């Protein structure tokens, strides 16, 4: 018997060795014959690879295209060597150890430093797929989509599934920062220098050391095990690689950098009878009369008829009876230089007195998604259904003048319990299909860049900008969480993001202070949007009094002056996924003081914005990371790596400028393109050597995709007693309009001369004089130099200050 046991044991060991050995290569694809079936690794680049494993041992053949848009990559050079217990794989930047029994990965950088090490735990448990990894002692985790709860998720458990949250409203439910998931993204980045994209549409759970300190796991409730490992080591490289997979944010029209204004047309819920087609043009007129810059307008829910089956939850594409002449309304708004007017729609169809869309869709069979819990839900996964929805619904309002839509209720897709299919996965993909349909259709109809205003999203939603944060209340308790949500979603590949300036829905007494503080933050958000549902104020600035009006106009005008800077950063988002609004940890990942800062962020590479989020605050502290910083209001200098407290006057948003900054600014405008950009002001904060490339194109067409743009490089060089500033000629296929240059810079030394291309400029009597003629003035009190140059962007310009 003992001999038989030894023989059987030997046979089993031999089979085990056979079952867990061998590999084959086909270009970037590597199949490993591991215990339990084949594992496939796909090397996308030298620093990114995909891991796939199925509980059945057979991987699905087709790759989905809702989340990931790129599967074909240039050949990657890598080597494979096999040992008895593992495979060793090397690229130019990574060393990957794949252990056979049990299967697990260990990833090191080229220097041999461990980045990521999986644990020997089951990968298939019931219906779930799971991966567990060791957590390094100083490792912290960021991303996960539009999370309002925390930034650093170390020690937390995160559940990702598109939903509004659960519980009693308004305290929890849709207003529960711990659960609300308008836009979850199964992607995270580690301060250890790597990111994980869990390529699944099923709900996921990320246990980031909650259950077992020293390890973390990510789990999905169905599907295959499919994830990407992305090496940085910096956060910006990880974001760039992740969006190489899921798609880059397209360029929005330049005017979309201006203010977006929403309205209930005079009557919100239970006041629908007060709406009218006269209200939107009158609102535009008031905005222009008050000198409040804005560019886009949309009409929220109450423009449309609520009817029959679903009440206000369905969309009939019929106008409420209070809208007598919608086309005249659109025409009147456009005559007042509104660049785009849009309408709020829902993902569910209903019947109206004239258009029986729900009935017609039922007859079509393939228009409504079969088995969906929400009857009337359009099957946006079907091109035929999208075409029908467009021609029979959206086109009826587009023909009158509507140029984009706000796609609400992207979370409506769920299958009935007795329906077949992968409803749990399709639920998270539905917001992508829903947002893509009007984005693509309106882009074709308008003959310009697309724009969709949407609430829900998932991995890949950045392709159909822009996302707004949802219906958060007009309360202090939700102010800072919304800022946190913007920072987290920016670290998840979604840079075109906004929120309801002042909050959305009022629960307690009106608070002018909260409105003013939220407006300040709103103007320094990637997209600036003013909208609220409270009747009859709707957050229109004049309803909050004169002080609030002055505050609104001050920061609105400042945003419009900053549009060359904002638009350039929109280009950087398009090219590299660098968010306009970025958490400080992205620039300072080794500084633990930045890991939890959710009321400070970088606005582009140079501006640190610090909203005041405490009611009646007399002061607040600010953390300055490494380097030197300038107070944007006063020019006062501060050394980095310190905390410092400041007074917080209500009409001032604390903004600090990183030393070395070069910020291009345009003249004040009431709408984008109101005036020619004839004088470009360069706001400079000299420190050592620094540079900034300003982006320009026609602002509206898709020609930028063909290389029709220009980059102008500005450089600053500060030495003891001398400062040199240069503006190169624009480079690229696009020819920008002519810009003269004005320069304003903080200098600690008093200039004796200012030279432009070797020619001495006249010293003038005041900064006001510099606005009107060539020359220079130095303000000794503020230590600020003002220069008006004779040259322009048709040639290179050099300014030397001694």
Image (cartoon, rainbow, N blue to C red):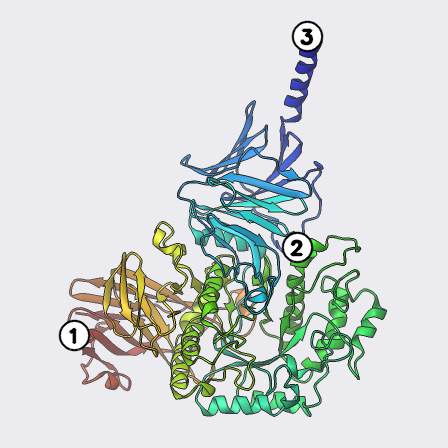
Answer whether residue 794 is visible to the viewer in this image: no
Say which label, 1 or 2, has the lower sequence index: 2
Q: CA distance from mark 3 to mark 1?
A: 100 Å
Q: Closer to the observer: label 1 or label 2?
A: 2
- Binning the other alpha carbons within 10 Å of mark 2 as few (below 14), some (14 to 19) or many (20 upward) gives few
The image quarter containing residue 243 is bottom right
Relative to 752, does residue 108 appear above or below in the rendering?
above
Could you say which disc has been placed on residue 584 in the image?
A: none
Whether pointer 3 and pointer 1 mark residues with C-beta atoms closer than 8 Å, the reply is no
Whether pointer 2 and pointer 3 mark residues with C-beta atoms closer than 8 Å, the reply is no
Relative to 470, does residue 138 appear above or below in the rendering?
above
Q: Does dot 2 land on a helix, a strand or a loop? A: loop
Q: Which residue is mark 2?
A: 65
Q: Which residue is mark 3?
A: 2
- Which of the pair 636/174 is nearer the observer? 174
- Which of the pair 540/585 is nearer the observer? 540
Q: Residue at x 65, y 23 (%)?
A: 16
Q: Which residue is mark 1?
A: 753
Q: Does dot 3 land on a helix, a strand or a loop? A: helix
Answer whether residue 61 is visible to the viewer in this image: yes
Say which label, 3 or 1, has the lower sequence index: 3
Relative to 404, does residue 80 appear above or below in the rendering?
above
Q: Does dot 1 land on a helix, a strand or a loop? A: loop
Q: Is residue 66 left or right of residue 282?
A: right
- Residue 342 pos. (x, y %): 61, 79
Count of marks overlaid on the render: 3
- Residue 770 pos. (x, y %): 25, 83
- Residue 626 pos. (x, y %): 29, 56
Q: Which quarter shows the C terminus? A: bottom left
């Amino acid at each position: 018997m003992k001999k038989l046991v030894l023989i059987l044991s030997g046979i089993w060991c031999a089979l085990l060795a056979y079952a867990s050995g061998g590999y084959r290569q086909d270009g970037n694809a590597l199949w490993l014959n591991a215990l339990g079936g084949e594992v496939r690794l796909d090397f996308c680049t030298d620093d990114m690879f995909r891991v796939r494993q199925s509980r059945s041992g057979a991987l699905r053949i087709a790759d989905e295209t809702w989340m990931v848009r790129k599967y074909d990559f240039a050949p990657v050079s890598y080597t494979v060597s096999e040992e008895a217990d593992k495979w060793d794989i090397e690229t130019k930047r990574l060393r990957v150890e794949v252990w056979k029994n049990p299967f697990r990965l260990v990833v090191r950088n080229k220097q041999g430093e461990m980045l990521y090490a999986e644990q020997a735990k089951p990968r298939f448990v019931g219906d779930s797929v799971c991966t567990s990894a060791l957590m390094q002692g100083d490792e912290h985790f960021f991303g996960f989509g539009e999370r309002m709860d925390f930034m650093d998720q170390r020690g937390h458990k995160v559940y990702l599934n598109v939903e509004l949250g659960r519980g009693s409203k308004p305290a929890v439910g849709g207003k529960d920062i711990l659960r609300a998931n308008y836009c979850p993204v199964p992607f995270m980045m580690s301060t250890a220098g790597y990111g994980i994209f869990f390529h699944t549409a099923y709900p996921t759970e990320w246990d980031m050391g909650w259950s077992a300190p020293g390890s973390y796991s990510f789990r999905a409730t169905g599907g295959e095990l499919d994830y990407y490992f992305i090496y940085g080591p910096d956060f910006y490289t990880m974001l760039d690689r992740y969006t190489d997979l899921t798609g880059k944010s397209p360029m929005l029209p330049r005017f979309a950098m201006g203010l977006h204004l929403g309205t209930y047309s005079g009557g919100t819920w239970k006041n629908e009878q007060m709406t009218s087609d006269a209200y939107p043009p009158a609102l535009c007129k008031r905005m222009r009369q008050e000198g409040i810059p804005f560019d886009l307008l949309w009409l929220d829910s109450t423009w449309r008829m609520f009817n029959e089956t679903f009440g206000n939850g369905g969309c009939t594409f019929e106008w409420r009876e209070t809208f007598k002449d919608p086309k005249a309304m659109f025409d009147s708004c456009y005559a007042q230089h509104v660049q785009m007017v849009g309408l709020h729609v829902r993902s569910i169809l209903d019947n109206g007195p004239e258009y029986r869309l729900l009935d017609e869709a039922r007859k079509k069979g393939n228009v409504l998604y079969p088995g969906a819990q929400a009857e009337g839900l359009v099957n946006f996964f079907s091109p035929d259904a999208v075409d029908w929805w467009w021609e029979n619904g959206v086109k009826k309002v587009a023909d009158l003048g509507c140029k984009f839509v706000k796609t609400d209720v992207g979370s409506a897709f769920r299958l009935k319990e007795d329906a077949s299919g992968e409803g749990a996965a399709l639920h998270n993909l539905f917001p992508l299909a829903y947002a893509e349909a009007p984005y693509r259709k309106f882009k074709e109809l308008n003959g310009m860049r697309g724009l969709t205003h949407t609430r829900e999203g998932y991995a890949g939603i950045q392709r159909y900008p822009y996302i707004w944060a949802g219906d958060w209340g007009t309360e202090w308790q939700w102010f800072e969480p919304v800022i946190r949500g913007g920072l987290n979603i920016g670290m998840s590949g979604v840079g075109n993001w906004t929120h309801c300036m002042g909050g959305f829905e009022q629960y307690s007494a009106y608070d002018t202070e909260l409105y003013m503080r939220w407006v300040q933050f709103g103007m320094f958000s990637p997209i600036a949007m003013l909208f609220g549902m409270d009747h009859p104020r709707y957050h229109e600035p004049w309803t909050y009094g004169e002080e609030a009006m002055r505050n609104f106009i001050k920061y609105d005008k400042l945003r419009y002056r900053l549009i060359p800077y904002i638009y350039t950063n929109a280009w950087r988002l398009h090219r590299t996924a660098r968010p306009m609004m970025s958490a400080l940890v992205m620039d300072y990942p080794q500084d633990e003081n930045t890991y939890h800062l959710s009321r400070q962020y970088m606005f582009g590479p140079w501006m640190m914005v610090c909203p005041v989020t405490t009611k009646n605050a007399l002061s607040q502290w600010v953390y300055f990371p490494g380097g030197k910083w300038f107070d944007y209001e006063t020019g006062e200098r501060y050394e980095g790596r310190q905390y410092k407290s400041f007074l917080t006057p209500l009409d001032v948003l604390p903004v600090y400028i990183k030393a070395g900054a070069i910020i291009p600014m345009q003249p004040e405008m009431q709408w984008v393109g109101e005036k020619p950009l004839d004088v470009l002001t360069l706001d400079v904060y000299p420190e050592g050597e620094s540079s900034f490339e300003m982006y320009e194109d026609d602002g509206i067409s898709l020609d930028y995709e063909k290389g029709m743009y220009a980059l102008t490089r500005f450089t600053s060089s500060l030495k003891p007693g001398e400062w040199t500033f240069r503006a190169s000629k624009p480079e690229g296929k696009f020819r920008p309009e002519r810009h003269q240059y004005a320069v304003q810079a903080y200098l600690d030394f008093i200039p004796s001369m200012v030279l432009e291309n070797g020619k001495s400029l006249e010293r003038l009597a005041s900064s006001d004089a510099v606005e009107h003629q060539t020359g220079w003035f130095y303000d000794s009190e503020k230590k600020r130099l003002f220069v008006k140059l004779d040259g322009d962007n048709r040639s290179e310009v050099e300014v030397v200050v001694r």
